[in-house]
Image (cartoon, rainbow, N blue to C red):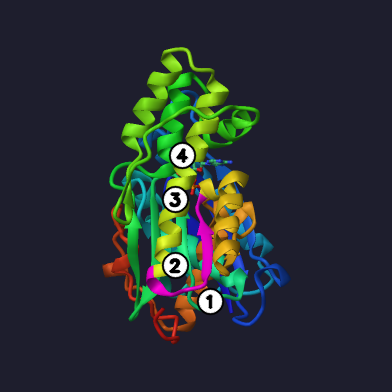
Amino acid sequence: MRILGIEGTAWAASAAVYRFDPDAPLDSDPPFVETDAYQPESGGIHPREAAEHMGEAIPTVVETALDAADGPIDAVAFSRGPGLGPCLRIVGTAARALAGTLDVPLIGVNHMVAHLEIGRHGSGFDSPVCLNASGANAHLLGYHDGRYRVLGETMDTGVGNAIDKFTRHVGWSHPGGPKVEAAAEGGEYVDLPYVVKGMDFSFSGLMSAAKDAYDEGTPVEDVCFSLQETIFAMLTEVAERALSLTGSDELVLGGGVGQNERLREMLSTMCADRGAAFHAPEPRYLRDNAGMIAVLGAKMYAAGDELAIEDSAVDPNFRPDEVDVTWRSDESV
Ligand code: ATP
């Protein structure tokens, strides 16, 4: 079975072809992925510019992926949300047109569940808790009774967007996360607000404090170091409590911020300390990519989870806990 996946929720115009074998580990037959990234000239992601990028780049990346396919496509999977509405609408239109032209079913994939499933797919884990640390989101998910439940989440911005706001303030180009990681080397700790409320966390006050510290003359490497230590400790604390509450001993990481080595180190130390297993997929599967859409699309297709054209409207606020998990038959955590 061969699935074409299309991703375009924000910055990555991406297409992938995946030959599905439910028993094969991801690295034995990885999806072919072609991505064209939108790079803002200044500031952060502008929705209109990002959508223009999608309109220009999606046809090319899809053509490249289809050229690389070594056989017919059985279904077209696309990111239905969450994401930027103008980008999603372009990807949705492309997916519907392709499914019609190829005369194959359409599969509507939740982008956040795809971040989780690509990690689970490569891990050999049964029912992990997942920390999705991405640009526009931050949450802990655990499987229970046919759905991924949100166990904890950000009360304001996504974790990557929060970091990017600080780097814009400093005058660094988008994306800011890798620059903060590089600048944090050799930094020293300064106090920043640590905001965890129950199972939820908040970044906006922390970011204002980081901007103030920088404006008042704290060296930028100290602010970057402290930002990482504070934000990642908050995420690690809630991830640990999610493991404890669910009784799971498996943690997977998803999302572009998961590319950060310090975050992975903290999570892996926490898991080792409590006897849990930790898995983070390769960086190319952590950031937005159509490989994860094709992989989850394949599982949904195998489960008969198809989307009628008339029901295929995109949803910029599509939450992971709205998705019926049709492709798993295992017991709840
Ligand atoms: P979502 O998946 O929630 O829609 P998104 O589309 O913005 O979010 P992702 O590709 O998951 O995207 O993540 C992009 C984010 O990852 C950006 O905010 C970027 O700054 C951040 N990021 C990338 N590399 C690193 C890193 N090494 N350290 C910290 N953050 C990083």
Q: Secondary structure at mark 1?
A: loop
Query: What is the three-letter code of the residue carrying label 1?
Result: Asp
* Residue 150: mark: none
Residue at screen point 43% across, 28% down:
166
Quarter of the figure that contains the N terminus: bottom right
Viewer-nearest of labels 1 and 2?
2
Residue 294 appears in the picture as rendered:
no
Please give the range of residues in magenta: 245-255
* Residue 235: mark: 3
Query: What is the three-letter code of the residue carrying label 2?
Result: Leu
Viewer-nearest of labels 4 and 1?
4
Q: Is residue 252 magenta?
A: yes
Residue 22 in the image, given as x and y percentages of width and height: 59, 81
Mark with earlier residue (2, 3): 3
Report the residue marked by disc 1.
74
Report the residue marked by disc 4.
230
Report the residue marked by disc 2.
243
Quarter of the figure that contains the C terminus: bottom left
Query: What is the three-letter code of the residue carrying label 3?
Result: Leu
Residue contact between numbered discs 3 and 4, judged by CB atoms under 8 Å: no
Image quarter of residue 109? bottom left
Q: Residues within 10 Å of mark 2 (few under 14, many from 20)?
A: many
Residue contact between numbered discs 2 and 3, judged by CB atoms under 8 Å: no
Residue 95 in the image, given as x and y percentages of width and height: 43, 61
Q: CA distance from mark 3 to mark 4?
A: 9 Å
Residue at the far front: name it. Answer: 273
Q: CA distance from mark 3 to mark 1?
A: 39 Å
Residue 322 in the image, given as x and y percentages of width and height: 29, 67
